[in-house]
Image (spheres, rainbow, N blue to C red):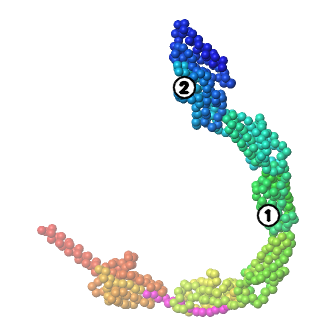
Amino acid sequence: MGCRRLLIIIMCASVLLSSFGVAVDGRSQVASAAYADMDRVTSEIAVASAPRGIGPLVTITSPSEGFCNNTGNVTVTWEAASSVSYFEVSLDGASAVNVSTNTSITFDALEEGGHNVNVTAYNIEGYSLSDEVNFIVDMTVPVLTITYPAVGAWYNVTTINATWTATDPGSGIHNTSVSLDGGGWITVTDEYYEITSLADGQHNLSVRVYDNADNVRTSTKTFNINTVPPTVYITDPSEAELLSSATVIATWEGDPPLEIANYWVSIDGGAWTDVDMNTSHTFTILSEGEHEVSVKASDYAGNMNTSIASFFVDSISPEVLFSSPNEGARIGTNALTVEWTMGETGSGIANTLARVDEGSWFTVFTTLSLTALEDGTHTVVVRSTDNAGNFEDATLTFVVDTVAPTVTGTPTGTSVPIASTVGAAFSEAMDQDSVIISVNGVTGTLTWNGNTAIFTPSTSLGYSTTYSVTVEGRDLAGNEVSESWSFTTMSNEGSISGTVRDPDGNLVENATVTLSNGQITTTDAYGRFVLTNVSAGNYTLEIIKAGFPTVIQNVEIGAGQESNLGSISFRSSTAGGDDSNGTTILAASGIMVVAMVAFLLLAGRRLKK
């Protein structure tokens, strides 16, 4: 109010100066006064529009200086001490708005931040006085973060020091309070609070902060207290259990299961292995003998407990070795005794079983007598089991064969090539050392191809000769066989054939074909000829036909060979394209000589002219 009085004094002084002839420009003269009212500073400017008088005094009644609003909608009210012609209102330095004689105005949807409102009152002479107010719009709740305890965390203590951070960039933090498990709110001045005498179980910590605009933020963290260690039970292997494998799967359970955070395992006092939340672990390549497995459990609060179980490993099966008969043996009788031995170095033999040909198991010791066995393959399985449950199935396979083998001999018949071998194909595997193949008057060697014995003569067999063959031997079961047969070799003869054509490629019929051994034949309607029963050797072939030059060709024939000379032409000097055998056509040579003589006579006559 003192500043307002000073403003009035200044304006009154301007009137007095004017009365004494001192010019005062009412439109440009400005009077300013600074005053403090309710802890705020405002500036009022009165502009004199005439040389005499002052404006009406105006006071903003709401909001107060520094007011904080959390809606963005602010109503400004004021009052004037004298008659007012109209009011003008300006927000944040914007152009003033004439509100007539209204003494309030509402600003909607204001942005967050600081704002300034200026109200100017005018009287009928145009004199004015102003008042202003500063306020803050803050619609954002504070930022609140509980830093301890962590949400869902477990602790194995009864006292914790809760901490948090709270900020508000708008209007600032006004107050903070805490509540535990829905209890009453406790006002605190720092960003921490010690909670004591916590019972085991779940707890809820709530922190609430207000800013100066009355925005509120509440944050709640749930945490757990557990001061009791968990219990862990090893379910497998059981204490002192005898196991039959060098690979052991240990299993266990933790209690209470929902509070277990982690498990570790150890074998024979070795390093701990972290297995997370798994309730089983496989140990491999364990040695024979006693072992100890340890399982350690930790709950979420960090409490720990350990369980231990001892067990024994016997992973080696008993050994069964057959001594009679041998594996795969062929037996020539329908009765035999199977014998074996057993070895066990671990927990000892518990029982021995046997079965024959997929039959039922029955108890045995170290021998098994079998009778009335049918011919064919038989299998005996002996199973020896130790006290740890390890067992070994030893299998013996043998063949009962009381039937003598059969033989299929080759070659047979006539016209057998002289380079042939003699074969004996047996119906089953034979004792190869017992097999003998005899060919009368012939020596040779014996080889095998599967179940077939092959006799290869030392030299070629003779032509047109009959040979007797005898085969003797035993199969693997000792059954004997004897077989004989004979065959006749080919004669030492062959055949010659071909087709005769004229110079134009036409087939020539009735041409005479003579072989140098005296055999003669003629070509048929298709120009073909055949000479049979020709002894092996080298010959000269002559072909004669009236009106054509004689064709002569060398021919070689082997025993049993069918020599086809192909097409033979009177115009060709060779047969079959082989110049080395060459054909001679004498008539062609004569024609060439006559032609040359005629050409020389004609040339001489032309020179005389």
69 relative to 157, above or below: above
Q: Is residue 265 visible?
A: no
Point out the image quarter for the C terminus: bottom left
The residue identified by callout 2 is: 86
Q: Is residue 111 above or below residue 585?
A: above
According to the picture, the residue beneath numbered tag 1 turns out to be: 248
- In which quarter of the view is residue 473 placed? bottom right
Q: Position of residue 471 (x, y in %)?
A: 64, 89
Asked if residue 78 lies left or right of residue 338, the reply is left
Picture residue at 81% right of the left edge, 76% below the top? 384
Judge left or right: residue 323 versus residue 7: right
What segment carries the magenta color?
481-495
Alpha-carbon span between mark 1 and mark 2: 99 Å
In the picture, residue 592 is in which quadrant? bottom left
The x and y percentages for residue 45 are: 58, 20
- Of labels 1 and 2, the one closer to you: 2
Sequence-earlier tag: 1 or 2: 2
